[in-house]
Image: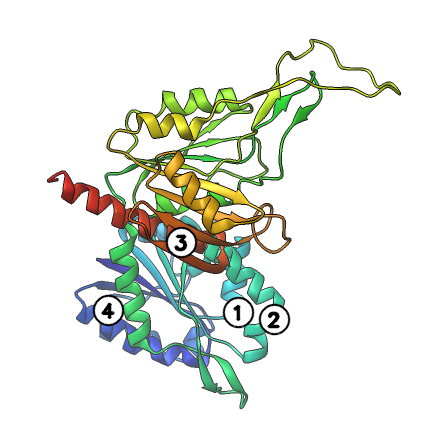
Amino acid sequence: MNIILGVGGGIAAYKAAELARLLMQQGHAVQVVMTARAKEFVRPLTFAALTGHKVIDDLFSSASPEATLSSAIEHIAVAQENDLLVVAPATADLLARFAHGIADDFLTTLYLAFTGPVVLAPAMNTNMWRHAATESNLETLRRRGHRIVDPGEGELACGMVGPGRLAEPEEIAAAVEAEIGRRRDLEGETVLITAGPTQEPLDPVRYISNRSSGKMGYALAEAAAARGARVVLISGPVHLAPPRGVTLVPVHTAREMRDAVFANLEPATVVIKAAAVADFHLSKVPPQKIKKTAARMSLELDPTPDILAELGRKKGDRLLVGFAAETENLKQETRRKMEAKNCDMVVGNLVGGEEVGFEADQNEVLLALRTGEMIPVARASKREVAGRIFDEILKLRLALYAANGR
């Protein structure tokens, strides 16, 4: 595999030389890209001698007009020719520039042009590591699917003792290997995901809906695409950008969502119903806005289509995953829903709190599996929870393939 090793400007830059050696021992070709500050700690010649490749350390060359033109597009070529980007050390400055899309040198410009998996190994002062800005930047990068190799604890170059020292090269190399093995484990699968709320009109300007933000469904779509699956995301109205490489099908009502699901069902091998579909809709929607009066108003509501139950009856050999948003009795309700809807897995989560569930960036869930297992997933970002869900989906999928002789 062709790997880009980005080296940031910190005292830990010397460890990147050992990381380059380990990656080459694992059979990878390594292209080193250094920031200007990194060259203050390690000479580019060191990496060139180790890898056998020239080190890229400048976005533009001043040697000649021809060289300048070549350098101006080199970051695109390097991004296209390599399979994985690992940055060690990833300084607080680099993390901030990656998170906010600032491209002012070769490494940060390359990052924006790179579409493969990214492994980041931060190293910095303890206070910088614990700062709210760094924590926010790390969360942004984790949501993008990047693997973070957390720093170790100990005495730092600044004299402080605490977290912030670069992880050992062996640990970073192991994370690279794990990322290589994990990233394409859903290749060949077509994953159909529903996300967000539905909106059931009461009149031309009002509707019934719920608090679903779509963040969990979008995190699942992003995770599936990153692991090699073809992804169709059927989404109710949300304020989220669709993940890269995902086919988005926007809908508003439960009926529209039901129709979109079955229109896209045939090629799907895994179906995940993460949407919070409204349970009722107005039996007859008036053509004009209902005027406000002092009198009490009663609305006659009918049930919306039960998409998950219908999928359970028609799923064939697909894997079907449902979601259960509960306010109490989570274990019992999650298990009941799995059996009643003929699912292979139901993801249960308690909603109503401020830190997890609807609208929050984190989640804490319980996975009820057809095998009888109940697997708790501790509080983590929705992107990390999505990864755990797909880990279990993959196990179920492989078991199904084995049972069918595939």
Vertical side of 339 occupied by 87: above or below: below
Q: Spatial distance from mark 1 to mark 4, Cα to Cα? A: 24 Å
Q: Position of residue 13 (x, y in %)?
A: 39, 77
Q: Could you classify mark 3 by the number of other residues whose Cα lies within 10 Å: few (under 14), some (14-19), or many (20 or more)?
A: some
Q: Nearer the viewer, mark 4 or mark 3?
A: 4
Q: Where is residue 364 in the image (x, y as percent from the top left)?
A: 50, 55
Q: What amino acid type should be assigned to the residue bearing mark 1?
A: Ala
Q: Is residue 100 left or right of residue 144?
A: right
Q: Where is residue 117 in the image (x, y as percent from the top left)?
A: 34, 54
At a point 64% along the width and 11% down the height, the residue shown is 284
Are discs 2 and 3 less than 8 Å apart at CB?
no
Q: Which of marks 4 and 3 is nearer the N terminus?
A: 4
Quadrant of the image containing the C terminus: top left
Residue 92: numbered disc: 1
Are discs 2 and 1 less than 8 Å apart at CB?
yes
Residue 131: numbered disc: 2
Residue bearing the label numbered 3: 68
